[in-house]
Image: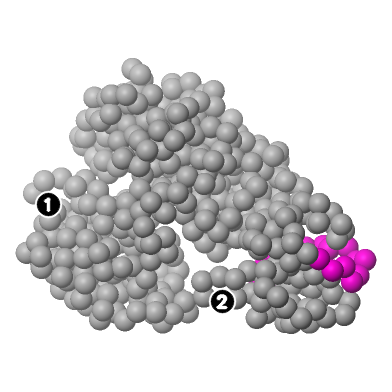
Amino acid sequence: MKFEEILEIIDWLSYEKNNDRQIVEVTNNSKDVGDGYAFVAVKGNISDGHAYIDSAIEKGAILVVHTEDIAYREGISYIKVEDARKALAQISNKLVGYPSEKMTVVSVTGSNGKTTTSRLVYFLMDEIYGKAANIGTDLALIGGKEYRTSNTTPVITEVNKLMKICVDEGMKYLSLETSSHGLDQKRIYGVDIDYGIFTNLSREHLDYHKTMDNYFKAKMILFNQAKHTVANIDDPYGRKAKELFPNTITYAIDNPDADYRAENVVKKDGKITYEVRGVKFSLNTIADYEVYNTLAATSTLNAMGASLDEISKAMDKFKGVKSRFEYIKNDLGINIVIDFAHTPVAFDLLFKSVPEGCKTYAVFGVNGDRNKEFRVSTGKACAINKVFAVLTTDDPKFDTLENVNRDVKEGINAENGEYVEINNRKKAIEYAVTHAKAGDYIFLLGKGEENFLKLKGNEKTYYSERETLTEVLESL
Protein backbone atom coordinates (compact mmCIF):
# COMPACT_ATOMS: atom_id res chain seq x y z
CA MET A 1 0.00 0.00 0.00
CA LYS A 2 1.26 3.47 -0.87
CA PHE A 3 1.73 6.33 1.55
CA GLU A 4 -0.93 8.37 -0.28
CA GLU A 5 -3.49 5.57 0.14
CA ILE A 6 -3.00 5.68 3.89
CA LEU A 7 -3.60 9.42 3.95
CA GLU A 8 -6.92 8.80 2.20
CA ILE A 9 -8.27 6.40 4.84
CA ILE A 10 -7.06 7.80 8.18
CA ASP A 11 -7.76 11.02 10.06
CA TRP A 12 -4.35 12.68 10.06
CA LEU A 13 -3.22 15.94 11.68
CA SER A 14 0.05 16.35 9.78
CA TYR A 15 2.49 14.26 7.77
CA GLU A 16 5.93 14.15 6.20
CA LYS A 17 6.71 11.83 3.32
CA ASN A 18 10.38 10.85 3.06
CA ASN A 19 10.32 7.71 0.90
CA ASP A 20 8.32 6.12 -1.94
CA ARG A 21 8.39 2.54 -0.68
CA GLN A 22 5.31 0.30 -0.48
CA ILE A 23 3.99 -0.44 3.02
CA VAL A 24 3.64 -4.21 3.31
CA GLU A 25 2.28 -4.57 6.85
CA VAL A 26 1.30 -2.60 9.97
CA THR A 27 1.79 -3.30 13.67
CA ASN A 28 1.84 -1.57 17.04
CA ASN A 29 4.33 -4.07 18.47
CA SER A 30 7.94 -3.13 17.72
CA LYS A 31 8.96 -6.80 18.20
CA ASP A 32 6.88 -7.76 15.16
CA VAL A 33 8.26 -5.10 12.81
CA GLY A 34 9.89 -6.21 9.59
CA ASP A 35 11.21 -4.53 6.45
CA GLY A 36 8.63 -2.27 4.82
CA TYR A 37 6.37 -2.07 7.87
CA ALA A 38 4.32 0.80 9.21
CA PHE A 39 4.71 1.15 12.98
CA VAL A 40 1.87 2.73 14.96
CA ALA A 41 2.98 4.14 18.32
CA VAL A 42 0.08 3.44 20.68
CA LYS A 43 0.14 4.99 24.13
CA GLY A 44 -1.22 2.24 26.42
CA ASN A 45 -1.93 1.91 30.12
CA ILE A 46 1.36 0.18 30.87
CA SER A 47 3.75 1.11 28.06
CA ASP A 48 4.02 3.89 25.48
CA GLY A 49 4.72 2.89 21.89
CA HIS A 50 6.59 6.14 21.31
CA ALA A 51 9.44 4.72 23.39
CA TYR A 52 9.89 1.96 20.80
CA ILE A 53 9.94 4.04 17.62
CA ASP A 54 13.72 3.88 17.21
CA SER A 55 13.67 0.11 17.72
CA ALA A 56 10.93 -0.24 15.09
CA ILE A 57 12.92 1.82 12.59
CA GLU A 58 16.03 -0.27 13.20
CA LYS A 59 13.99 -3.38 12.39
CA GLY A 60 12.76 -1.98 9.08
CA ALA A 61 9.83 0.35 9.69
CA ILE A 62 9.53 2.90 6.87
CA LEU A 63 6.46 4.72 8.23
CA VAL A 64 5.74 5.84 11.78
CA VAL A 65 2.26 6.86 12.90
CA HIS A 66 2.33 8.79 16.16
CA THR A 67 0.32 11.08 18.46
CA GLU A 68 3.11 12.81 20.41
CA ASP A 69 5.63 15.31 19.04
CA ILE A 70 8.78 13.42 18.11
CA ALA A 71 12.06 14.01 16.29
CA TYR A 72 11.93 12.90 12.65
CA ARG A 73 14.68 10.82 11.04
CA GLU A 74 15.85 11.09 7.45
CA GLY A 75 14.32 8.58 5.04
CA ILE A 76 11.41 7.69 7.32
CA SER A 77 7.87 8.90 6.60
CA TYR A 78 5.65 10.11 9.44
CA ILE A 79 1.96 10.73 10.06
CA LYS A 80 0.69 12.44 13.18
CA VAL A 81 -2.82 11.46 14.27
CA GLU A 82 -5.13 12.12 17.19
CA ASP A 83 -6.18 8.48 17.71
CA ALA A 84 -3.45 5.90 17.12
CA ARG A 85 -5.66 2.85 17.78
CA LYS A 86 -8.18 4.05 15.21
CA ALA A 87 -5.41 4.64 12.66
CA LEU A 88 -3.99 1.17 13.34
CA ALA A 89 -7.39 -0.38 12.62
CA GLN A 90 -7.99 1.69 9.49
CA ILE A 91 -4.60 0.79 8.00
CA SER A 92 -4.91 -2.87 8.95
CA ASN A 93 -8.43 -3.17 7.52
CA LYS A 94 -7.26 -1.70 4.21
CA LEU A 95 -4.12 -3.83 3.99
CA VAL A 96 -6.01 -7.13 4.35
CA GLY A 97 -8.87 -6.09 2.06
CA TYR A 98 -11.72 -5.84 4.59
CA PRO A 99 -12.30 -9.60 5.06
CA SER A 100 -15.25 -9.11 7.43
CA GLU A 101 -17.28 -7.74 4.53
CA LYS A 102 -16.98 -11.11 2.81
CA MET A 103 -18.63 -13.03 5.69
CA THR A 104 -21.68 -12.90 7.96
CA VAL A 105 -20.19 -11.86 11.30
CA VAL A 106 -21.89 -12.40 14.68
CA SER A 107 -20.18 -10.74 17.66
CA VAL A 108 -20.91 -11.48 21.33
CA THR A 109 -20.19 -9.27 24.34
CA GLY A 110 -21.18 -9.21 28.03
CA SER A 111 -19.73 -9.90 31.47
CA ASN A 112 -20.70 -13.58 31.56
CA GLY A 113 -21.54 -16.13 28.88
CA LYS A 114 -19.49 -14.63 26.03
CA THR A 115 -17.40 -17.69 25.27
CA THR A 116 -20.14 -20.30 25.46
CA THR A 117 -22.59 -18.17 23.46
CA SER A 118 -19.96 -17.33 20.85
CA ARG A 119 -18.91 -20.98 20.50
CA LEU A 120 -22.55 -22.13 20.35
CA VAL A 121 -23.38 -19.59 17.63
CA TYR A 122 -20.37 -20.87 15.68
CA PHE A 123 -21.47 -24.49 16.14
CA LEU A 124 -25.04 -23.81 15.05
CA MET A 125 -24.00 -21.78 12.00
CA ASP A 126 -21.62 -24.54 10.97
CA GLU A 127 -24.26 -27.26 11.48
CA ILE A 128 -27.06 -25.40 9.71
CA TYR A 129 -25.23 -23.36 7.06
CA GLY A 130 -21.70 -24.80 6.97
CA LYS A 131 -18.38 -22.97 6.49
CA ALA A 132 -18.32 -21.26 9.92
CA ALA A 133 -15.40 -20.12 12.08
CA ASN A 134 -14.93 -18.78 15.61
CA ILE A 135 -12.51 -16.30 17.17
CA GLY A 136 -12.72 -16.36 20.97
CA THR A 137 -10.88 -16.49 24.27
CA ASP A 138 -7.39 -17.97 23.73
CA LEU A 139 -8.47 -19.81 20.58
CA ALA A 140 -9.69 -19.44 17.01
CA LEU A 141 -11.32 -22.34 15.15
CA ILE A 142 -11.04 -22.04 11.37
CA GLY A 143 -11.59 -24.85 8.86
CA GLY A 144 -10.88 -27.58 11.39
CA LYS A 145 -7.64 -25.95 12.58
CA GLU A 146 -6.90 -24.28 15.91
CA TYR A 147 -5.04 -20.98 16.23
CA ARG A 148 -3.98 -19.61 19.62
CA THR A 149 -5.02 -16.01 20.31
CA SER A 150 -3.47 -13.46 22.64
CA ASN A 151 -6.62 -12.09 24.36
CA THR A 152 -10.39 -12.55 24.47
CA THR A 153 -10.37 -10.02 21.65
CA PRO A 154 -6.93 -9.89 19.99
CA VAL A 155 -5.47 -6.65 18.63
CA ILE A 156 -7.04 -5.59 15.32
CA THR A 157 -4.05 -6.73 13.25
CA GLU A 158 -4.38 -10.25 14.67
CA VAL A 159 -8.17 -10.22 14.21
CA ASN A 160 -7.71 -9.20 10.58
CA LYS A 161 -5.10 -11.88 9.92
CA LEU A 162 -7.44 -14.51 11.34
CA MET A 163 -10.37 -13.18 9.30
CA LYS A 164 -8.18 -13.23 6.19
CA ILE A 165 -7.48 -16.92 6.88
CA CYS A 166 -11.25 -17.43 7.20
CA VAL A 167 -11.86 -15.91 3.78
CA ASP A 168 -8.97 -17.82 2.21
CA GLU A 169 -10.36 -21.06 3.70
CA GLY A 170 -13.79 -20.34 2.22
CA MET A 171 -15.55 -19.51 5.50
CA LYS A 172 -18.88 -17.72 5.07
CA TYR A 173 -19.84 -17.25 8.73
CA LEU A 174 -17.84 -16.01 11.71
CA SER A 175 -18.63 -15.87 15.42
CA LEU A 176 -16.44 -13.32 17.20
CA GLU A 177 -16.12 -12.88 20.97
CA THR A 178 -15.59 -9.25 22.00
CA SER A 179 -14.54 -7.92 25.39
CA SER A 180 -15.14 -4.44 26.76
CA HIS A 181 -11.38 -3.79 26.65
CA GLY A 182 -11.31 -4.89 23.02
CA LEU A 183 -14.20 -2.61 22.11
CA ASP A 184 -12.84 0.37 24.02
CA GLN A 185 -9.39 -0.10 22.51
CA LYS A 186 -10.79 -0.34 18.96
CA ARG A 187 -9.62 -3.92 18.43
CA ILE A 188 -12.58 -4.52 16.09
CA TYR A 189 -12.91 -0.96 14.78
CA GLY A 190 -14.17 -1.02 11.21
CA VAL A 191 -15.06 -4.72 11.31
CA ASP A 192 -18.34 -5.34 9.49
CA ILE A 193 -20.66 -6.76 12.19
CA ASP A 194 -23.99 -8.21 11.06
CA TYR A 195 -25.34 -9.28 14.48
CA GLY A 196 -24.23 -7.98 17.89
CA ILE A 197 -25.26 -9.94 21.01
CA PHE A 198 -25.29 -8.52 24.56
CA THR A 199 -25.56 -11.17 27.32
CA ASN A 200 -25.45 -9.27 30.62
CA LEU A 201 -23.42 -6.85 32.72
CA SER A 202 -22.05 -7.27 36.25
CA ARG A 203 -19.44 -5.47 38.31
CA GLU A 204 -16.15 -6.34 36.64
CA HIS A 205 -13.17 -4.54 35.10
CA LEU A 206 -13.90 -1.35 37.08
CA ASP A 207 -10.16 -1.05 37.59
CA TYR A 208 -10.18 -0.17 33.88
CA HIS A 209 -13.59 1.39 33.22
CA LYS A 210 -13.93 3.08 36.66
CA THR A 211 -17.76 3.18 36.56
CA MET A 212 -20.55 0.84 35.48
CA ASP A 213 -21.77 3.55 33.13
CA ASN A 214 -18.40 3.58 31.34
CA TYR A 215 -18.38 -0.21 31.29
CA PHE A 216 -21.84 -0.28 29.68
CA LYS A 217 -20.88 2.39 27.14
CA ALA A 218 -17.91 0.26 26.10
CA LYS A 219 -20.22 -2.69 25.50
CA MET A 220 -22.57 -0.53 23.46
CA ILE A 221 -19.77 0.24 20.99
CA LEU A 222 -20.67 -3.17 19.56
CA PHE A 223 -24.33 -2.20 19.17
CA ASN A 224 -23.36 1.03 17.44
CA GLN A 225 -21.28 -1.02 15.03
CA ALA A 226 -23.73 -3.89 14.36
CA LYS A 227 -26.46 -3.94 11.71
CA HIS A 228 -28.75 -6.03 13.97
CA THR A 229 -28.68 -6.24 17.78
CA VAL A 230 -29.74 -8.94 20.27
CA ALA A 231 -30.03 -8.50 24.05
CA ASN A 232 -31.03 -10.31 27.25
CA ILE A 233 -33.79 -8.18 28.81
CA ASP A 234 -33.86 -10.10 32.09
CA ASP A 235 -30.67 -8.11 32.68
CA PRO A 236 -31.24 -4.42 33.58
CA TYR A 237 -28.48 -3.31 31.22
CA GLY A 238 -30.01 -5.43 28.49
CA ARG A 239 -33.24 -3.48 28.96
CA LYS A 240 -31.23 -0.27 28.79
CA ALA A 241 -29.67 -1.48 25.53
CA LYS A 242 -33.16 -2.10 24.16
CA GLU A 243 -34.15 1.46 25.06
CA LEU A 244 -31.11 2.85 23.26
CA PHE A 245 -31.56 0.55 20.26
CA PRO A 246 -35.34 0.04 19.87
CA ASN A 247 -35.05 -2.51 17.05
CA THR A 248 -33.07 -4.87 19.26
CA ILE A 249 -34.19 -8.52 19.23
CA THR A 250 -34.75 -9.62 22.84
CA TYR A 251 -34.61 -12.87 24.82
CA ALA A 252 -35.39 -13.76 28.43
CA ILE A 253 -36.66 -16.35 30.86
CA ASP A 254 -38.67 -14.11 33.17
CA ASN A 255 -39.59 -11.06 31.07
CA PRO A 256 -42.87 -11.71 29.19
CA ASP A 257 -42.09 -8.95 26.69
CA ALA A 258 -39.12 -10.81 25.20
CA ASP A 259 -39.23 -11.79 21.53
CA TYR A 260 -37.78 -15.18 22.49
CA ARG A 261 -38.71 -16.51 25.92
CA ALA A 262 -37.85 -19.84 27.56
CA GLU A 263 -41.05 -21.33 28.97
CA ASN A 264 -41.83 -24.51 30.94
CA VAL A 265 -38.23 -24.75 32.16
CA VAL A 266 -37.61 -28.09 33.88
CA LYS A 267 -34.35 -29.36 35.44
CA LYS A 268 -34.31 -33.14 35.87
CA ASP A 269 -31.91 -36.07 35.60
CA GLY A 270 -28.92 -33.89 34.76
CA LYS A 271 -30.74 -32.06 31.96
CA ILE A 272 -32.67 -28.85 31.43
CA THR A 273 -35.63 -28.71 29.05
CA TYR A 274 -37.65 -25.69 27.97
CA GLU A 275 -39.77 -24.41 25.10
CA VAL A 276 -39.44 -21.41 22.81
CA ARG A 277 -42.57 -20.59 20.82
CA GLY A 278 -43.76 -24.15 21.27
CA VAL A 279 -40.51 -25.79 20.15
CA LYS A 280 -38.77 -27.97 22.75
CA PHE A 281 -35.09 -27.56 23.58
CA SER A 282 -32.99 -29.94 25.69
CA LEU A 283 -29.62 -29.15 27.29
CA ASN A 284 -27.18 -31.71 28.72
CA THR A 285 -26.35 -29.61 31.77
CA ILE A 286 -27.71 -28.59 35.16
CA ALA A 287 -26.27 -25.07 34.81
CA ASP A 288 -29.36 -22.82 34.78
CA TYR A 289 -27.53 -19.90 33.15
CA GLU A 290 -26.91 -22.02 30.05
CA VAL A 291 -30.55 -21.38 29.15
CA TYR A 292 -29.62 -17.72 28.58
CA ASN A 293 -26.65 -18.66 26.41
CA THR A 294 -28.78 -20.94 24.24
CA LEU A 295 -31.56 -18.32 24.02
CA ALA A 296 -29.03 -15.78 22.75
CA ALA A 297 -27.85 -18.18 20.06
CA THR A 298 -31.37 -19.33 19.20
CA SER A 299 -32.77 -15.83 18.72
CA THR A 300 -29.80 -14.85 16.56
CA LEU A 301 -29.91 -17.93 14.32
CA ASN A 302 -33.67 -17.61 13.94
CA ALA A 303 -33.23 -13.96 12.91
CA MET A 304 -30.68 -15.16 10.35
CA GLY A 305 -33.32 -17.42 8.80
CA ALA A 306 -32.91 -20.80 10.50
CA SER A 307 -36.12 -22.35 11.85
CA LEU A 308 -36.51 -23.09 15.57
CA ASP A 309 -36.84 -26.79 14.75
CA GLU A 310 -33.53 -26.70 12.85
CA ILE A 311 -31.84 -24.90 15.73
CA SER A 312 -33.22 -27.32 18.34
CA LYS A 313 -32.03 -30.39 16.40
CA ALA A 314 -28.58 -28.89 15.82
CA MET A 315 -28.27 -27.89 19.47
CA ASP A 316 -28.78 -31.53 20.54
CA LYS A 317 -25.36 -32.26 18.99
CA PHE A 318 -23.53 -29.51 20.92
CA LYS A 319 -21.08 -31.02 23.41
CA GLY A 320 -20.39 -27.80 25.27
CA VAL A 321 -17.20 -25.78 25.66
CA LYS A 322 -14.10 -26.82 27.57
CA SER A 323 -13.90 -25.28 31.03
CA ARG A 324 -17.51 -24.12 30.95
CA PHE A 325 -19.29 -26.28 33.55
CA GLU A 326 -17.15 -29.15 32.31
CA TYR A 327 -17.39 -32.36 34.32
CA ILE A 328 -14.08 -34.16 34.79
CA LYS A 329 -14.37 -37.94 34.96
CA ASN A 330 -12.88 -39.56 38.04
CA ASP A 331 -13.08 -42.80 40.05
CA LEU A 332 -14.00 -41.10 43.31
CA GLY A 333 -17.67 -40.44 42.58
CA ILE A 334 -17.12 -36.68 43.07
CA ASN A 335 -18.66 -34.13 40.73
CA ILE A 336 -15.52 -32.24 39.73
CA VAL A 337 -16.22 -29.25 37.49
CA ILE A 338 -13.74 -26.94 35.75
CA ASP A 339 -15.21 -23.55 34.93
CA PHE A 340 -13.67 -20.26 33.83
CA ALA A 341 -16.07 -18.31 36.10
CA HIS A 342 -14.20 -15.45 37.73
CA THR A 343 -16.85 -12.91 38.78
CA PRO A 344 -19.16 -12.82 41.82
CA VAL A 345 -22.23 -13.10 39.59
CA ALA A 346 -20.79 -16.07 37.70
CA PHE A 347 -19.94 -17.76 41.01
CA ASP A 348 -23.47 -17.21 42.30
CA LEU A 349 -25.04 -18.65 39.14
CA LEU A 350 -22.81 -21.72 39.27
CA PHE A 351 -23.48 -22.44 42.92
CA LYS A 352 -27.24 -22.05 42.52
CA SER A 353 -27.16 -24.77 39.84
CA VAL A 354 -26.01 -27.42 42.32
CA PRO A 355 -28.78 -29.79 43.52
CA GLU A 356 -29.95 -29.15 47.06
CA GLY A 357 -28.26 -31.13 49.79
CA CYS A 358 -24.91 -31.46 48.01
CA LYS A 359 -21.76 -30.34 49.80
CA THR A 360 -19.84 -27.93 47.55
CA TYR A 361 -16.20 -26.85 47.50
CA ALA A 362 -14.82 -24.00 45.38
CA VAL A 363 -11.09 -23.73 44.64
CA PHE A 364 -10.32 -20.23 43.42
CA GLY A 365 -8.36 -17.01 43.69
CA VAL A 366 -9.02 -13.47 42.52
CA ASN A 367 -6.94 -11.39 40.12
CA GLY A 368 -4.76 -8.69 41.58
CA ASP A 369 -6.28 -6.00 39.36
CA ARG A 370 -9.79 -6.39 40.82
CA ASN A 371 -10.98 -3.75 43.29
CA LYS A 372 -11.84 -4.48 46.91
CA GLU A 373 -15.60 -4.51 46.35
CA PHE A 374 -15.18 -7.18 43.67
CA ARG A 375 -13.01 -9.32 45.95
CA VAL A 376 -15.35 -9.01 48.92
CA SER A 377 -18.36 -9.86 46.75
CA THR A 378 -16.61 -12.97 45.46
CA GLY A 379 -16.15 -14.18 49.04
CA LYS A 380 -19.77 -13.40 49.87
CA ALA A 381 -20.98 -15.38 46.85
CA CYS A 382 -19.38 -18.49 48.38
CA ALA A 383 -20.64 -17.94 51.91
CA ILE A 384 -24.22 -17.04 50.95
CA ASN A 385 -24.49 -20.24 48.90
CA LYS A 386 -22.99 -22.37 51.72
CA VAL A 387 -19.94 -23.20 49.60
CA PHE A 388 -16.70 -24.16 51.35
CA ALA A 389 -14.06 -21.87 49.86
CA VAL A 390 -10.57 -23.23 49.24
CA LEU A 391 -8.89 -19.89 48.77
CA THR A 392 -5.73 -19.99 46.66
CA THR A 393 -3.80 -18.02 44.05
CA ASP A 394 -5.02 -16.85 40.66
CA ASP A 395 -3.13 -13.92 39.08
CA PRO A 396 -1.86 -11.53 41.79
CA LYS A 397 -0.14 -9.50 39.06
CA PHE A 398 0.96 -6.14 40.54
CA ASP A 399 -0.73 -6.75 43.91
CA THR A 400 0.17 -9.25 46.62
CA LEU A 401 -1.65 -12.50 47.31
CA GLU A 402 -1.95 -11.42 50.96
CA ASN A 403 -3.87 -8.25 50.02
CA VAL A 404 -6.12 -10.05 47.55
CA ASN A 405 -7.06 -12.88 49.91
CA ARG A 406 -7.60 -10.52 52.84
CA ASP A 407 -10.46 -8.88 50.96
CA VAL A 408 -11.96 -12.20 49.84
CA LYS A 409 -11.87 -13.49 53.42
CA GLU A 410 -13.61 -10.32 54.58
CA GLY A 411 -16.52 -11.20 52.31
CA ILE A 412 -16.62 -14.81 53.50
CA ASN A 413 -16.54 -13.82 57.17
CA ALA A 414 -19.24 -11.16 56.67
CA GLU A 415 -21.67 -13.98 55.80
CA ASN A 416 -20.29 -16.51 58.31
CA GLY A 417 -18.87 -18.72 55.59
CA GLU A 418 -16.28 -21.48 55.80
CA TYR A 419 -12.87 -21.45 54.16
CA VAL A 420 -9.31 -22.63 54.20
CA GLU A 421 -6.42 -20.69 52.66
CA ILE A 422 -3.82 -22.67 50.69
CA ASN A 423 -1.66 -20.48 48.48
CA ASN A 424 -0.24 -23.27 46.34
CA ARG A 425 -2.96 -24.00 43.77
CA LYS A 426 -2.07 -27.67 43.32
CA LYS A 427 -2.20 -28.29 47.07
CA ALA A 428 -5.51 -26.40 47.21
CA ILE A 429 -6.98 -28.75 44.60
CA GLU A 430 -5.57 -31.71 46.51
CA TYR A 431 -7.25 -30.48 49.69
CA ALA A 432 -10.65 -30.27 48.01
CA VAL A 433 -10.35 -33.68 46.36
CA THR A 434 -9.25 -35.43 49.57
CA HIS A 435 -11.96 -33.81 51.72
CA ALA A 436 -14.89 -34.20 49.33
CA LYS A 437 -17.04 -37.33 49.44
CA ALA A 438 -18.87 -39.17 46.70
CA GLY A 439 -21.74 -37.02 45.41
CA ASP A 440 -20.13 -33.74 46.52
CA TYR A 441 -19.28 -30.97 44.06
CA ILE A 442 -15.86 -29.41 43.55
CA PHE A 443 -15.59 -26.31 41.36
CA LEU A 444 -12.14 -25.36 40.07
CA LEU A 445 -12.72 -21.75 39.09
CA GLY A 446 -11.08 -18.87 37.28
CA LYS A 447 -8.33 -20.44 35.16
CA GLY A 448 -10.19 -22.60 32.67
CA GLU A 449 -8.09 -23.09 29.54
CA GLU A 450 -5.58 -20.38 30.44
CA ASN A 451 -2.11 -21.89 30.52
CA PHE A 452 -0.46 -19.50 32.93
CA LEU A 453 -0.40 -17.81 36.32
CA LYS A 454 0.65 -14.17 36.60
CA LEU A 455 2.43 -14.30 39.93
CA LYS A 456 4.39 -11.10 39.40
CA GLY A 457 3.23 -8.28 37.18
CA ASN A 458 2.23 -9.53 33.72
CA GLU A 459 4.96 -12.18 33.67
CA LYS A 460 3.44 -15.56 32.85
CA THR A 461 4.38 -18.78 34.66
CA TYR A 462 3.14 -21.95 32.97
CA TYR A 463 0.16 -23.54 34.68
CA SER A 464 -2.62 -25.86 33.49
CA GLU A 465 -5.67 -26.48 35.68
CA ARG A 466 -6.49 -29.66 33.77
CA GLU A 467 -2.96 -31.09 33.99
CA THR A 468 -2.70 -30.18 37.68
CA LEU A 469 -6.01 -31.89 38.47
CA THR A 470 -4.88 -35.00 36.54
CA GLU A 471 -1.67 -35.11 38.59
CA VAL A 472 -3.66 -34.85 41.83
CA LEU A 473 -6.12 -37.58 40.83
CA GLU A 474 -3.36 -39.90 39.67
CA SER A 475 -1.45 -39.42 42.94
CA LEU A 476 -4.52 -40.61 44.82
Distance CA(mark 1)–CA(mark 2): 48 Å
Q: Is residue 307 left or right of residue 50?
A: left
Q: Earlier in the sequence, mark 1 or mark 2?
A: 2
Q: Quadrant of residue 411?
A: bottom left
Magenta range is 15-31
| Residue drawn at point x = 21 percent, y = 72 percent | 407
Camera-side mark, 1 or 2: 2
Assess whether residue 261 is covered by the magenta stretch. no
Q: Is residue 186 above or below residue 168?
A: below
Q: Quadrant of residue 249?
A: top left
Q: Position of residue 350 (x, y in %)?
A: 25, 50
Q: Secondary structure at mark 1?
A: loop
Q: Which residue is mark 2?
A: 47
Image quarter of the N terminus: bottom right
| Residue drawn at point x = 77 percent, y = 51 percent | 9
Q: Position of residue 148 (x, y in %)?
A: 57, 61
- Check residue 358 in the rendering and tell me which mark sits there, or answer none: 1
Q: Residues within 10 Å of mark 1 (few under 14, many from 20)?
A: some
